[in-house]
Image: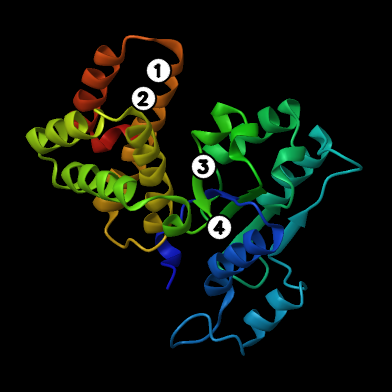
Amino acid sequence: MINAKKLPSALIVEGDEKNLIEDRVNKIILPLFCLSDKEKPCGLCEGCRKVKQNIHPDLIYIYPEKKTYTVEQVREVKSQAYLPPNESEHKIFIFTDGEALTDYAQNALLKILEEPPAYAIFIIETDNSKRLLSTILSRCTIVSSRSTEVFYEQEVIEAGDKLLKACLVGDEFEIMQAVSENSKNEDVFDLSLSYIEQRVADEILNKSDENTRKKLINIVRICRKYKHRSKLNANKRLNLTMLISDLGNFDLEEIE
C-alpha cells in the first residue's frame, strides 16, 4: 500500500505503454483520495468513485494544447496549485504527455516543483524520462511502470541488489567491493545502476522511515551523477573512485 504521508511531491511515471503508465498512476493517487478508515484504496467510497469517474475537484489532468504544453498552461497550473484543495488533503496535477513539455514549459515549472505547497503533488507521465531536462529530473522521483524482472537478467539484479544493500548499511568497504566486482563487466555494471534506479523508485513510495527514504533518493542521484560523469569523462578509474566515495560518504542533509 502506498504511504501517502511520505509520497514525494513530484513524480515522473514512465513506461512503454500508456495504459500501464495510467494504471501505475492510479495506484499512486487512489489511496490519497480514499475516505475509508481501513485499507486504502477501498474503491467504494465517494473519493475513490470520483477519481475513477474523473470528476474529483482536487485531481487535475493537464493535456497539451495541440502538440505541446505552453508556458501559459504551466502558469495556470501554478496559480491553481496555490489554491487549497476542495475536498481532500491533497491536490494532484497530472501532465499526461511529459514528452510534450517544451524546454520553456519545463523551465516555467521548475519553481513550483522546487517549492510546492505542502498539499500539492505533481505527476508527469512519459514514455521516456530522458526527454525531460536534467533540472526537472533532479527535482522528481522517477517511477517505472515496467517490471524489473522482465527487463533485467539475474546477473544484473544480483549485482544491483548487492550494491544497494551495501549502500543502505553504509559499509564503505562493502560498497568498494561491490563496485569493484560489478565494474569488471562494464555492461552489467551500467545496467545494475539502472536497475537500482528503477527498484529504488518503486521502494520510495512504500517507505515510512524518513532516513531510509532519503538514503534511497540520494543513492539514485549518485548513480545518475556517475552515469553523467562517465559520458563526459573517459577516465573510468577516476569515475569509479568518485562513485565509491559518493556512495560511502553522502550526507542526508544534502537532500533536504
Residue placed furthest toward the right:
66
Q: Secondary structure at mark 4?
A: loop
| Dot 1 or dot 3, earlier in sequence | 3
Question: Label 1, label 2: how many angstroms apart (C-alpha)?
Answer: 5 Å
The secondary element bearing badge 1 is classed as: helix
Residue type beneath disc 3? Cys
Which quadrant of the structure image shows residue 190?
top left
**First reached walking from the N terminus: tag 3 or tag 4:** 3
Which residue carries the number 4 mark? 145
Q: Are marks 1 and 2 in contact (CB under 8 Å)?
A: yes
Q: Which mark is residue 140?
A: 3
Q: Which residue is mark 2?
A: 226
Q: Rate crowding at label 4 as few (under 14), some (14 to 19) or many (20 or more) other CA atoms within 10 Å.
A: many
Q: Residue at x 38, y 32 (%)?
A: 187
Instruction: Name the residue type under label 1.
Output: Arg
Q: Which residue is mark 1?
A: 229
Of 225 and 195, the residue lying toward us: 195
* Residue 33: x %, y % from top left: 58, 73
Question: How far apart are labels 1 and 4 at the CA level?
Answer: 27 Å
